[in-house]
Image (tube, rainbow, N blue to C red):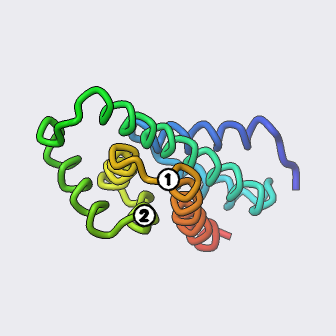
Amino acid sequence: MQQTVVGLWELFLSAFISSTIAPGGSEVVLAYMVSTGNYQVENLIFAATLGNTLGAMTTWGLGLLAAQRYPVATLLSADKQKALAIVKTKGLWALFFSWLPVVGDALCFAGGWLKLPLFSAFLIIMLGKFCRYLVVAWLFV
């Protein structure tokens, strides 16, 4: 099993970018890397989870900054207003679903907008991302 640090960094960057402003396919990258058998699956899951979580926290930070600059929620787009309502209703645990396509980024943004506790948000987002990557890796081992 030959494992390169460069490959892990590539997965990390793919996961980070996939969780911020640009769409990406970190699940596809993970699935490919797992299926090659050239990497320890645990390291791949760790790199993808960390990158995607840090990207989500970047979006959380953008929500926090936006709330300071534009405190009126009606200025937000419809999808962000919907996510804001979900997070207001469900609380911190709504951030577990930040791994979902399309709505996940909006949930992270809403978490920042609502000034949810940083460390708790980080842990819950990371748990959701970890579970998703664990399932993807399991499917392609």
Query: Are circles 1 and 2 on residues that touch, CB within 8 Å?
Result: yes
Looking at the picture, tell me which residue is in the foreground, 84 or 27. 84
Quadrant in which the N terminus appears: bottom right
Q: Residue at x 72, y 56 (%)?
A: 36
Image quadrant occupied by the C terminus: bottom right
Q: Which residue is rendered at x = 55% and y = 48% of the image?
A: 52
Q: Residue sitting at 42 percent across and 58 percent down?
A: 98
Where residue 62 sits in the image (x, y, percent)?
40, 34
Residue at x 56% of width, y 40% of height? 14
- Asked if 47 appears above or below 68 in the picture, the reply is below
Q: CA distance from mark 1 to mark 2?
A: 8 Å
List the single residue furthest toward the right. 1
For marks 1 and 2 on the same chain, the one whose residue lies earlier in the sequence:
2
Does residue 110 appear left or right of residue 77 in this picture?
Answer: right
Rendered location of residue 42, percent (x, y) = 76, 62
Tag 1: residue type?
A: Pro
Say what secondary structure mark 2 lies in: helix
Mark 2 = which residue? 92
Q: Residues within 10 Å of mark 1 (few under 14, many from 20)?
A: few
Q: Nearer the viewer, residue 131 or 74?
A: 74
Left or right, residue 39 beside residue 87: right
- Residue 117 marker: 1
Q: Can you give x and y, in whole percent of width and height, for residue 23 in the image?
A: 39, 40
Mark 1 vs mark 2: in front: 1
Q: Quadrant of residue 94?
A: bottom left
